[in-house]
Amino acid sequence: MSEATRLPFEPRHGEAVPVGPDVVRVTAGNASAFTFRGTNSYIVGRDRLAVIDPGPEGDDEHMAALLDAIDGRPVSHILVTHTHADHSPLARPLAAKTGALIAGCGPHVAARLLHAGEINPLDAAADRDHRPDLIMADGDVLTGDGWSFAAISTPGHTANHLCFALAGTDILFSGDHVMAWSTSIIAPPDGSMADYMASLERLMARPERTYLPGHGGPVSDAPNVVRAHRTHRRMRERAIIERLASGDRFIADMVREIYRETDPRLHGAAALSVLAHLEDMVERGLAICEAAPSLDRAFGPALSD
């Protein structure tokens, strides 16, 4: 994970902060090394509302803050970008309180099957109870009272990740795919680097210039930020190629060198990101592995002709 894009951000926990026309942000108090200052929930509309990514289950303070911001107005839909436990679980109790329909991404699914003997180190991060009333596919449009969202399929961080473009505005709700505070964690088997890179290309072709992400402040000049994320991942791939050429064979050794200036609490996530790169690189013939790529396998540089 890179901190190169990190920007100051004051979440104002518990407050409804205006961030766009008829759009407010309410940030949960679940700050951590992985969530920055907390998960951002968004409330869209004026008279009949939509809520995006209501947050983690069991957070009574965040639920109270959302209900204060809703202020008795009807909520027709709760949209979910992806099924990580800091984004989707509160949708169910919020729907029970408001009568809203849950829409957006489908149930949690891995980007690939587990290899023999492999375990998913981030399994607990998945919300496997997510069962939406309406699953949105790429290009689907959801229209409410004064607002309309188009779903953009952006797998990579998770296989079911969606972004939502708000019609008539320059705003795209980017979930955890593109953020201003850090690059996204890509953690196999739930995440896929090949999918993530392809999703960045999709967003670069879109017109929106302001992203409202799942963590941190708004992303301004979004196309250039997306290009910077793409460049960062290409640089990380080159760094892995250099480590392989220097004799490193195991991910732990690569992480110690490549992520020397990164918070050690994030080295586990960094290892998963390196694995995601190596999975993609093996598939593309840029690296080799003795068996199916995993955290403890030995890797080598691509064989020369």
Image: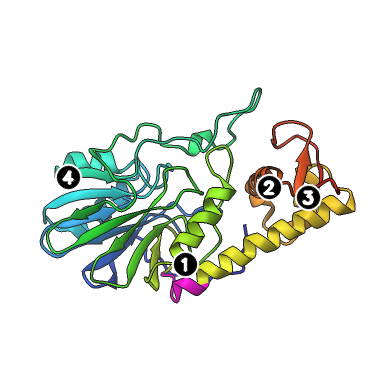
Kindly identify which residue carries mark 2: 284
Q: CA distance from mark 1 to mark 2?
A: 23 Å
Label 1 vs label 3, nearer the camera: 1
Q: CA distance from mark 3 to mark 2?
A: 20 Å
The front one of 78 and 205 is: 205
Percent of width and height locating residue 241 = 78, 54
Q: Does residue 89 sit above or below 185 in this rendering?
A: above
Residue 15 seen from this side: no
Sequence-first tag of 4 and 1: 4
Percent of width and height locating residue 93 = 25, 39
Sequence-first tag of 4 and 3: 4
The three-letter code of the residue at mark 3 reads Met
Which label is found at residue 204?
1
Q: Quadrant of residue 23?
A: bottom left
Provide the residue span drawn in magenta.
218-224
Sequence-first tag of 1 and 3: 1
Q: Does residue 201 sit above or below 20 in this rendering?
A: above
Kindly identify which residue carries mark 4: 100
Residue 136 seen from this side: yes
Q: CA distance from mark 4 to mark 3?
A: 47 Å
Residues at discs 1 and 2 in contact (Cβ within 8 Å) = no
